[in-house]
Amino acid sequence: MPDAQASPRPLTERVFALPNEHAANAFGATLATAITAAMRAAPAHGMQVHLVGELGAGKTTLVRAMLRALGHAQRVRSPTYTLVEPYTIENVDGAPLSIYHFDLYRFADPAEWEDAGFREYFDTGALCLIEWPQRAGGVLGVPDLQIELEVQGEGRKLTARAYSEIGKECVARC
């Protein structure tokens, strides 16, 4: 996200307490259902979700739970070294849903995002899940949805912020 002064206000924001891994996985399933429902209503739009949190906060774990809930039965790899992992899931209506899971942790400069050629992924109506979006500076623009995870003992505090109508619909469904 751009710096706090340039960031727009969220349309809506909700905080969820996830006391354990089971609760985090259940939230991931709920979020996956909410996202696919919102995307079905606006199929050409695609969706950009920023996942923010310190190392070990549960960003990749949340993505794994989402992919499992969407029916992905194979291994879900962290894209820490590959930078992006692509998935294709069959939607409930039988149409394929392209999902791109990015991890920008290793980026040292926002120009690396442009150099990597990732812009094309964002213009396809796909679901783009981006860990460490701040490493791309402002080039990603404002997300539809931002998920911030904070460690709280054995659990997590999850703050969902919607910056678009499709993001707002997702937060309402969670």
Image (spheres, rainbow, N blue to C red):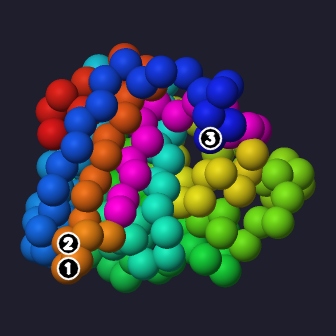
Q: Quadrant of the C terminus?
A: top left
Q: Nearer the viewer, residue 154 or 77?
A: 154
Which amino acid does the dot numbered 1 rest on? Glu
At 66% across and 63% down in the image, what residue appears? 104
Residue 145 lies in the magenta stretch: yes
Mark 2 in CB contact with mark 3 (< 8 angstroms): no
- Residue 16 vertical placement versus 132 (above, below): above
Question: In screen coordinates, is 110 left or right of 104?
Answer: right
Task: Please give the residue where the numbered disc 2 appears in the rendered image.
Answer: 155
Q: Is residue 142 left or right of residue 109?
A: left
Q: Residue at x 22, y 77 (%)?
A: 153
Residue 152 image-quadrant placement: bottom left
Q: Residue at 40% of width from left, 52% of height from top?
A: 148
Magenta residues?
138-150
Q: Element under label 1?
A: loop
Three-letter code for the amino acid on which mark 3 is drawn: Met
Residue 3 located within the stretch drawn in magenta: no
* Category of crowding for the residue at label 1, using alpha-carbon neighbours closer than 10 angstroms: few (below 14), some (14–19), many (at least 20): few
State yes or no: discs 1 and 2 in contact (Cβ < 8 Å): yes
Q: Residues within 10 Å of mark 2 (few under 14, many from 20)?
A: some
Residue 25's quadrant in the figure?
bottom left
User: Which numbered disc, 2 or 3, marks the residue that appears first in the sequence?
Assistant: 3
Reading the image, the residue beneath label 3 is 1
Determine whether the residue tagged by mark 2 lies in a helix, strand or loop.
strand
Counting from the top left corner in percent of width and height, residue 105 is at: 66, 69
Location of residue 83 in the rendering, given as x and y in whole percent from the top left corner: 66, 69
Which part of the image, by quadrant, shows the N terminus? top right
Q: Is residue 68 visible?
A: no
Q: Amino acid at mark 2?
A: Gly
The residue labelled by disc 1 is: 154
